[in-house]
């Protein structure tokens, strides 16, 4: 895979040197970030549509913030503090599955339960970070919280490719079952769908994508990019396939534009913030379109 990355990078840098592409394409870290953006855009668009339909936005936010605890655990057990993926994936998967398991066995409202788990995770992470503060660079935590194109390397791209393959191999065959269980769990159960199993699979996919996207978007804002493109697409679409397709396009555009615009115009904002701001502007445009054209006002998916 690394040789493929190098080939793509060399071609883009040659085009930038010939002035066929903007000047930021001359830098290796920008191309790395853009390749990651082209991978996560489709993932966030498809999964974000399901997150919106299943009303799990707060759930994905809690998983993203749990990654801070995963980073602290990784440093404590001796992982590389720049890419503690084993600890982040391990802790976040445990966090998400435990939360989902508890949801099925309590009468508490989902938002209350998620808030409790999120508070515990943040408190644990803050406590552990006191022990590792001497070993970890503060910029590492900034990249986890807000994203950083400077921190993207071949390891991050390989992780994204791996997550993309897992989502394709696991999520695509179960997509219709996940959709039906989201829209009508009773009908899904009547048709032989194992609703709870499908829910656990979906939770694991959200967790994998969330952790894999932290270097680009950041833990604080990854939930926003899961939700905003899907919400924008819903404003101007009248069918589910159109919603998913447009959400993929918006998420991909936001990722690419959010990386390039600050570099091109020297805007001192974090990558994650720029990406979400671009997505928010698209959302405002679709909101205006929905309010202006009557055929979109009654549209629902």
Image (spheres, rainbow, N blue to C red):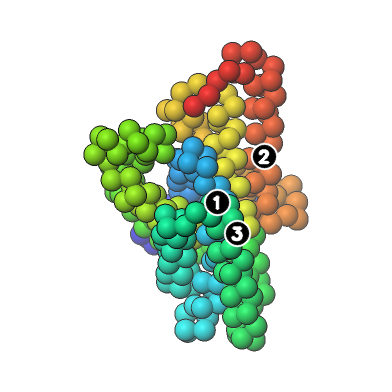
Side of 150 relative to 6 (left or right): right
Going from N to C along the chain, the mark reached first, 1 or 3, is 1
Side of 153 relative to 120 (left or right): left
Q: CA distance from mark 1 to mark 3?
A: 10 Å
Q: Indicate the quadrant where residue 131 lies.
A: bottom right
Residue drawn at x 28%, y 45% as measured from the top left: 194
Tell us which disc is closer to us: 1 or 2.
Answer: 1
Tell us which disc is closer to us: 3 or 2.
Answer: 3
Going from N to C along the chain, the mark reached first, 1 or 2, is 1
Q: CA distance from mark 3 to mark 2?
A: 25 Å
- How far across and how far down the image is residue 185, in percent? 37, 38
- How far across and how far down the image is residue 25, in percent? 58, 50
Q: Secondary structure at mark 3?
A: helix
In the picture of the structure, the residue carrying the numbered disc 2 is 280
Q: How crowded is the residue under tag 2: few (<14 C-alpha within 10 Å), some, or many (20+)?
A: some
Q: Nearer the viewer, residue 98 or 255?
A: 98
The residue lying furthest to the front in this view is 107
Residue drawn at x 52%, y 47% as measured from the top left: 56
In the picture of the structure, the residue carrying the numbered disc 3 is 115
Q: Nearer the viewer, residue 123 or 295?
A: 123
Q: Secondary structure at mark 1?
A: loop
In the picture of the structure, the residue carrying the numbered disc 1 is 109
Going from N to C along the chain, the mark reached first, 3 or 2, is 3
- Asked if residue 262 is positioned above or below residue 63 in the image, the reply reads above
- How far across and how far down the image is residue 241, in percent? 42, 28
**Residue 180 seen in this snapshot:** yes
**Residue 161 seen in this snapshot:** no
Q: Secondary structure at mark 2?
A: helix
Q: How crowded is the residue under tag 1: few (<14 C-alpha within 10 Å), some, or many (20+)?
A: few
Residue drawn at x 27%, y 35% as measured from the top left: 190
């Amino acid at each position: 895979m690394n040789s493929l990355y190098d080939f793509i990078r060399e071609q883009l840098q040659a085009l930038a040197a010939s002035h066929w592409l903007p000047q930021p394409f001359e830098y290796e870290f920008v191309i790395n970030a853009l390749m990651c953006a082209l991978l996560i855009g489709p993932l966030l668009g498809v999964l974000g549509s399901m997150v919106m339909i299943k009303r799990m936005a707060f759930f994905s936010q809690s998983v993203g913030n749990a990654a801070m605890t995963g980073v602290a655990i990784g440093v404590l057990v001796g992982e590389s503090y720049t890419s503690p993926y084993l600890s982040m994936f391990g802790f976040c998967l445990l966090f998400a599955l435990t939360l989902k398991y508890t949801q099925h066995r309590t009468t508490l409202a989902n938002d209350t339960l998620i808030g409790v788990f999120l508070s515990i995770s943040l408190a644990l992470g803050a406590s552990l970070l006191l022990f590792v503060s001497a070993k970890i660079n503060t910029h590492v935590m900034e990249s986890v919280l807000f994203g950083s194109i400077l921190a993207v390397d071949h390891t991050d791209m390989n992780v994204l490719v791996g997550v993309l393959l897992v989502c394709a191999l696991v999520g695509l065959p179960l997509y219709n079952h996940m959709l039906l269980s989201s829209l009508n769990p009773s009908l899904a159960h009547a048709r032989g769908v194992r609703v709870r199993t499908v829910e656990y699979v979906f939770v694991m996919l959200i967790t994998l994508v969330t952790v894999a996207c932290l270097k680009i978007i950041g833990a604080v804002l990854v939930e926003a990019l899961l939700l905003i493109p899907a919400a924008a697409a819903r404003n101007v679409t009248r069918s589910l396939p159109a919603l998913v397709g447009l959400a993929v396009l918006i998420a991909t555009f936001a990722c690419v534009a959010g990386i390039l615009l600050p570099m091109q115009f020297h805007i001192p904002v974090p990558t994650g913030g720029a990406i979400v701001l671009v997505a928010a502007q698209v959302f405002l445009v679709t909101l205006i379109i929905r309010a202006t054209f009557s055929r979109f006002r009654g549209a629902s998916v």
